[in-house]
Amino acid sequence: MTAAEIDPHDSRPERTTSVPKATGRFDVQLNPQATDAPIGRMSIDKQLYGDLEGTSKGEMLAVSSTAVKGSAGYVAMEVVTGTLHGRKGSFALQHNGTMNRGAQSLVVLVVPDSGTGELAQIAGTLRILIEGKEHRYELDYTL
């Protein structure tokens, strides 16, 4: 930006800071658990590779027996333990997913104040991408 392009009344910062992003892939194993409710329950075991190396353990609740095909919902909590861009620790993720007549929506957030060790101040969002049989993640985060 040149001096001629600067507006003295513009209070915006001159440059923006980018949010760190971690990318990679993961293997996931879902194990059905016994329940008497009309809600499915599964344990989650993940192995993560890439910028986030580690493991994850969690629990999922799901309803897929709706009157309309292609509609369902799930919630899940998981704790990730490992190394994120060289920083060791753990943090929790909260999932909220729906399918509305085939249209998918998924929000995965880092649980506030759930970080430990060198990840104690982590906040962010995670995207899950499924390409064929491969599961990938993109984690936008701040520390």
Image (cartoon, rainbow, N blue to C red):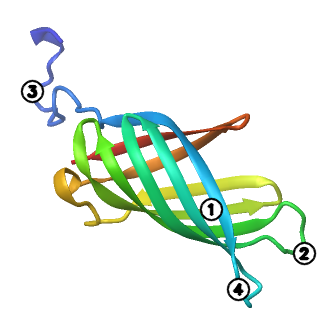
CA distance for labels 1 and 3? 46 Å
- Image vertical order of residue 31 relative to residue 38, above or below: above
Label drawn at residue 97: 1
Residue placed most toward the observer, 83 or 107 = 83
For marks 2 and 3, the one nearer the N-term is 3
For marks 3 and 4, the one nearer the N-term is 3
Query: Which residue occupies 43% across, 51% down?
Result: 55
The residue that label 2 is drawn on is 67
Query: Which residue occupies 83% across, 59% down?
Result: 101
> Residue 136: x percent and y percent?
56, 38
Query: Which residue occupies 33% across, 48% down?
Result: 82
For marks 1 and 3, the one nearer the N-term is 3
The residue that label 4 is drawn on is 35
Q: Secondary structure at mark 4?
A: loop
Q: Amino acid at mark 1?
A: Gly
CA distance for labels 4 and 2? 21 Å
Q: Secondary structure at mark 1?
A: strand
